[in-house]
Amino acid sequence: MMKTKIKRWLRKDAAAAWIFLAPSGAGFALFYLIPFAVGVFYSFMDRAVDGHFVGLDNYRELLASDSFRKAASNTFYFSAVSVPVMLALSLGVAMLLNKNVYLRTWLRTAYVLPLVVPVASIIMIWQMLFDWNGSLNAWLSGFGFERVDWMKTDAARNVVIVVYLWKNIGYNVILFLAGLQQIPKDYYETAQLEGAGRLRQFSSITLVYLTSTMFFVVIMSIMNSFKVFRETYLIAGDYPHDSIYMLQHYMNNMFASLDIQKLTAAATLMVGCILLIVMGLFALERRYRQFME
């Protein structure tokens, strides 16, 4: 009887899916889920070895830290500014490349190149560009403008935003292009016959049919904005200008000083904030779908 049930279960599509997902699920649990759970556990202890439960003391100490508050505010400011700019630019570029523009194939390749080029090798070019004696300051001085110490002033934040946009815009453009090509052209032709302008077509057709794609792009852009530490670290080092001191800088410095409690507490808070943002986006997307229906 038991063998018969097992055979019936294995014949189902769900069983095949679970069998193929099992190796990936095991790897995710082993290298991500279990270590994160252990980190959450350590965030409630006074030390990693032979520690004692201290409740929320580590979190209170963390929230009272000026460096953590500065890192958190910089990170959320960066996400709040860069994600909308990324969304607007990637959608605009995708709509442009979706038309029969000159050198369309070459432009598509150019936007995809940052995805395949290693960041570490490209950062040297960005450093040469934004250095005090770099190319950008040379051009500015040639036109009569004063030199700007880009990485040691508040302008460093703009540099990181530009690097983030350059690195991630190609992926979003690909997603938007795929979504745009799924919209039937008959809808636009019908709208034109009924006298709808380009703005009305964009709001009533393009945005409506790109809702799922835009939702996914926003989530991925937020995730990538929290991972900008790599580029910032390679450009400015361990202790960059205050305007680009991110949460990952704080956690990296806590790891270097072996302060595991603050490190795990900061990581837990960051993951919790990301989950709240994603859940809020899911709720907004659900309400928007109900409104459109």
Image (spheres, rainbow, N blue to C red):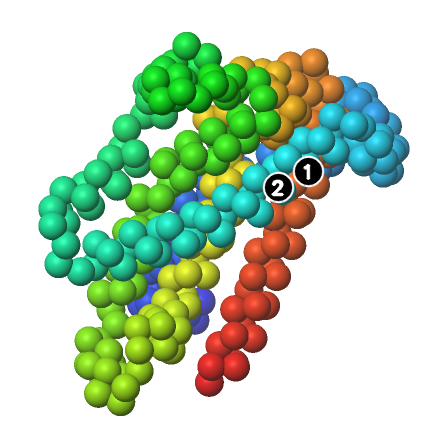
Residue type beneath disc 1: Ser
Decide: is 98 above or below 206. above
Please state if 66 lies on the left or on the right of 98 as rendered: right
Figure quadrant of residue 66 = top right
Other residues around mark 1 within 10 Å, as few (<14) / some (14–19) / many (≥20): some
**Image quarter of the N terminus:** bottom left
Count of marks, rendered view: 2
The residue labelled by disc 1 is 73
Q: Which residue is mark 2?
A: 77
* Depicted 201 relative to depicted 22: above or below: below
**In x, y percent, where is residue 9?**
38, 67
Q: Position of residue 158 (x, y in %)?
A: 50, 33
Q: Secondary structure at mark 1?
A: helix
The amino acid pointed to by label 2 is Tyr
Residue found at the far top of this picture:
133
> Picture quarter containing residue 180?
bottom left
Single out the residue that lies furthest toward the bottom: 194
Picture coordinates of residue 263 (x, y %)? 69, 27
Tell me the crowding category of disc 2: few under 14, some 14 to 19, or many 20 or more residues within 10 angstroms, Cα based: some
Residue 12 visible in rendering: no
Residue at image position (30%, 73%) is 198
* Residue 144 drawn at (x, y percent): 40, 20
- Marks 1/2: CA distance? 6 Å
Q: Nearer the viewer, residue 141 or 243?
A: 141
Outermost residue toward the front in this view: 144
Q: Residue at x 31, y 78 (%)?
A: 197
Q: Are marks 1 and 2 in contact (CB under 8 Å)?
A: yes
User: Which of the two residues, 8 or 178, is positioned nearer the viewer here?
Assistant: 178
Q: Is residue 84 left or right of residue 92?
A: right
Q: Residue at x 84, y 32 (%)?
A: 64
